[in-house]
Amino acid sequence: MSLQALWSVPLAYPAQVLNSLALVVALAGSWLLFATQRRRQLFKLRMVEGNFQEALMLAARHRVDGFFTRFGALSLALAVTLSWVSTGL
């Protein structure tokens, strides 16, 4: 398949390409939020078990967890916006 024929596919269906991009961004953002929530649950479990040394090491990641949560929520908002824009094409 030539490059010109390959380029004609996104030009013929721009809404589907944009919606596919929104799906990829949404999957990445939701996976990031899920992983962050799982890490927070492990932190709480280790605190209950009394394993304070590992809990302190995980407590140092608290700022990183906040960043990941904000970045995941932002990517989900971007995915919704991209999907909304693709309906107008």
Image (tube, rainbow, N blue to C red):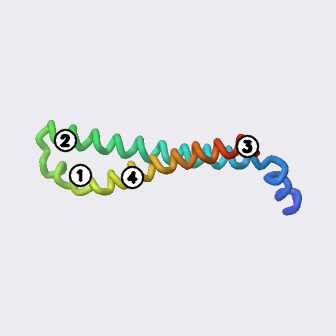
Secondary structure, mark 3, is loop
Q: Which residue is mark 2?
A: 46
The Cα–Cα distance between marks 4 and 2, rounded to whole angstroms, is 21 Å
Q: Classify 10 Å Cα crowding around label 3: few (below 14), some (14-19), many (20 and above).
A: few
Count of labels in the image: 4
| 4 or 1: tag closer to the N-terminus | 1
Disc 1 is placed on an element classified as helix
Disc 3 or disc 1, which is closer to the eye? 3
Nearest to N terminus: mark 4 or mark 2: 2
Q: Secondary structure at mark 4?
A: helix
Q: CA distance from mark 1 to mark 2?
A: 9 Å
Asked whether, in this view, residue 38 is left or right of residue 86, the answer is left
**Near-viewer residue (31 or 86):** 86
**Which residue is disc 4 drawn over?**
68
Q: Are marks 4 and 1 in contact (CB under 8 Å)?
A: no
Q: Residue type at mark 2: give it.
A: Arg
- At label 1, which amino acid type do we have? Leu
Residue 88: mark:
3
Q: x%, y% of residue 13?
A: 80, 47
Q: Answer with mark 3 or mark 1, whichever residue precedes in sequence.
A: 1
> What's the mark number on residue 69?
none
- Give the residue drawn at x 55%, y 49%: 78
In the rendering, at what x and y percent does residue 85 appear? 67, 46
Q: Provide the residue designation for mark 1.
A: 58
Considering every residue shown, the one lying at the far bottom of the view is 3
- Horizontal side, residue 61 vs residue 76: left or right: left
Q: Closer to the camera: disc 4 or disc 3?
A: 3
